[in-house]
Amino acid sequence: MKTFRALGYLNGDGSPVVPDLFWATVEHWAPRWVGLAQPIDADPRLVAELDANLNDLDELGWCVAGDAAAAAWHAPIVGGDIGARQWYVPSLDVLDTLRWTLCEPAPGERARAFVAVATTTVICRRRTDRGIGVPVEPLVTAALDLSLDQARGHETLEQWDPDAGQRVW
């Protein structure tokens, strides 16, 4: 906290300096996505074994990320929730098991899902129900994921006024 305050990203009362803290975080936001040959939630037994906790938001678990999450937060995503879903998982062990079990796509084959270890477990602890049938990443994480696309993502962020009223960018 001292470092953030010294850098000018926190006010004296500990509240964030918005949007400066968000854009400073963007500079370091780099999830490592791994493509999978099968959808991540295709095997209910595997989902249960790996503690996805898709039905229990009070527990650490998996969450949808990227465009699907942004669309669930009502970001103005063209096409909405399309394509292979991205998921954050809480640990490298979970990612490795998914990679081994669901396999990576063969060369020239399309990925059916993407998975990354959440950069912080807070993402997998503060999942939310946005009415799409699976937990969704927190609002700020959805915005950070969008920010990675220098053109379309930044344009979406400019046009997005989240219904949660928590715009931090």
Image (cartoon, rainbow, N blue to C red):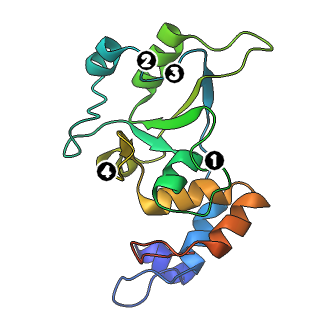
Task: Residue type at mark 1: give it.
Answer: Ala
Query: Could you tell me which residue is drawn at 26 percent across and 33 percent down?
Result: 53
Point out residue 144 in the picture as x, y percentages from the top left corner: 57, 59
Q: Which mark is residue 129?
A: 4
Q: Vertical placement of 103 versus 121: above or below?
A: above
Residue 32 placement, left or right of 88: right
Q: Which mark is residue 39?
A: 3
Point out residue 41 in the picture as x, y percentages from the top left corner: 41, 23
**How far is the residue under mark 2 from the one under mark 1?**
26 Å
- Disc 4 or 2, which lies upstream in sequence? 2
Residues 24 and 124: in front is: 124
Q: Vertical placement of 168 versus 122: above or below?
A: below
- Disc 3 or 4, which lies upstream in sequence? 3
Q: Which mark is residue 42?
A: 2
Verify CB contact (< 8 Å) between mark 3 and mark 2: yes
Please, what secondary structure does the residue beneath circle 1 have?
loop
**How far is the residue under mark 4 from the one under mark 2?**
20 Å
Please, what secondary structure does the residue beneath circle 2 have?
loop
Point out residue 47 in the picture as x, y percentages from the top left corner: 33, 21
Q: Which mark is residue 30?
A: 1
Residues 122 and 139: in front is: 139
- Disc 1 or 3, which lies upstream in sequence? 1
**How far is the residue under mark 3 from the one under mark 4?**
20 Å
Counting other residues with Cα less than 10 Å from the Cα at mark 3, is it few (<14), some (14-19), or many (20 or more)? Answer: some
Task: Residue type at mark 2: give it.
Answer: Ala
Please, what secondary structure does the residue beneath circle 3 have?
loop
Task: Residue type at mark 4: give it.
Answer: Asp
- Disc 2 or 1, which lies upstream in sequence? 1
Point out residue 11 in the picture as x, y percentages from the top left corner: 43, 88
Please, what secondary structure does the residue beneath circle 4 have?
strand
